[in-house]
Image (cartoon, rainbow, N blue to C red):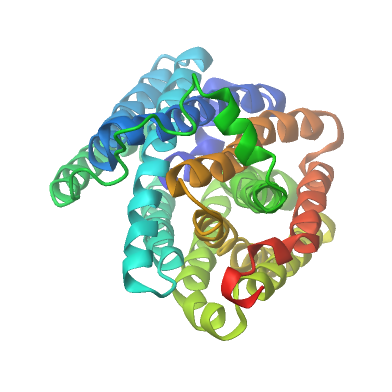
Amino acid sequence: MASWITRTPAIRDALSASTGQMGLILFGLSVGSMSGILMSGAAVSRFGTRPVAIAGLSLVVASMLAIGAGVVLTSKMITAVGLALIGFGMGLSEIAVNVDGADVERLSERPLLHTLHGFYSLGTVGGAIFGFGLTALDIPVVWHLMAIAIVVGAMSFAACRYLPAGIGRQDTPDITDRSDTQGWLSLIAERRLLMIALIVLGMALAEGSANDWLPILMVDSYNVSQASGSLMFVVFAAMMTVGRFGGGYFLERYGRARVIRASAISCAIGIGVAMLARDPITGSLAVVLWGLGASLGFPVTLSAAADTGKHPAARVAVVATGGYIAFLAGPPGLGFIGEHYGLRSALAVVLLAVVVAAIVAQATKSDSSR
């Protein structure tokens, strides 16, 4: 993901795409993500987490090659298809690896999911630094993406061999099976789970909007170079990593609800400052608050969802769908608003969603302290 994000200004220029057209290209990522997430709950219940994770990661590798081909052929359609592949692959593997993580957390009897998400952010930092370096050296995007496909493919093969078989598989149909509409509706009707889904939606929109638009926002709004725009995403990813690895202390001391509320407030301040700042230094400080605030929202709320009752995989899938709705509606929506009013103004939608997350943060409070 970091490889795509850091090269978005260069890819936009190579495709001669407007802000609105970039929003439509990003729609491929959103559609793929939503499709993958909707299939993942039933797939994990039938096959277990390991084969679903392997299939998802394989599609991520293929997506890098497809996006590279889209850039070489200057095809917006092929690029959008490549993004759909990465979205579908990540959507499939998202639930699988989070079910595994929730299982490790349950066995350990202490908060761990945020730390596992920290490694996602650590990979993002590494990919962002690499992308920043290649951007500064003016290395073609296609060579960058081909190198990442090789590295990710090798790492995925090495890691997936050690995933245990059978985790998440059920002998009875999963509650989120496509044929069991009542199962989905019964979960969505649970007030607490619905509130948690709203939190995920807001915090995922905050994270996803930075992933999709931050380099372009910095280049267009602050008149910095493409390399500097990529560097700002490095800062954002680094703050996400710090927040996720350092969040355990605060979660154990203050609990989920207080941490989520404080995170949402920090995120809101960062986004608000990013909307109003006029110089890159102030914009950089806004990115720091934005990244720290967004860091714990997604993993902590997924952990809370798994604790709300039976069928933890289904509950994680339902709540994560809230996040992917943000990824589905966010990129093209922000692109459309940005085309007419500017990306700064488009961030008002994200700010509102984060404020809502802060208001309903109490829903993540653990049962033991309710």
Q: Is residue 144 visible?
A: yes
State the quadrant of the N terminus: top left
Above or below, 143 against 249 in this view is above
Counting from the top left corner in percent of width and height, residue 67 is at: 40, 25
Counting from the top left corner in percent of width and height, residue 187 is at: 61, 40
Above or below, 300 against 250 in this view is above
Above or below, 333 against 205 in this view is above
In this view, the residue in front, 59 or 126, is 59
| Left or right for 254, reference 261 | left
| Left or right for 38, reference 182 | left
Counting from the top left corner in percent of width and height, residue 320 is at: 55, 43
Q: Quadrant of residue 154?
A: top left
In the orientation shown, which residue stands out farthest toward the front? 172
Q: Please give the count of numbered marks on the rendered protein.
A: 0
Above or below, 312 against 326 in this view is below
Q: Name the residue rendered at 75%, 58% in the picture.
A: 271
Q: Quadrant of residue 332?
A: top right
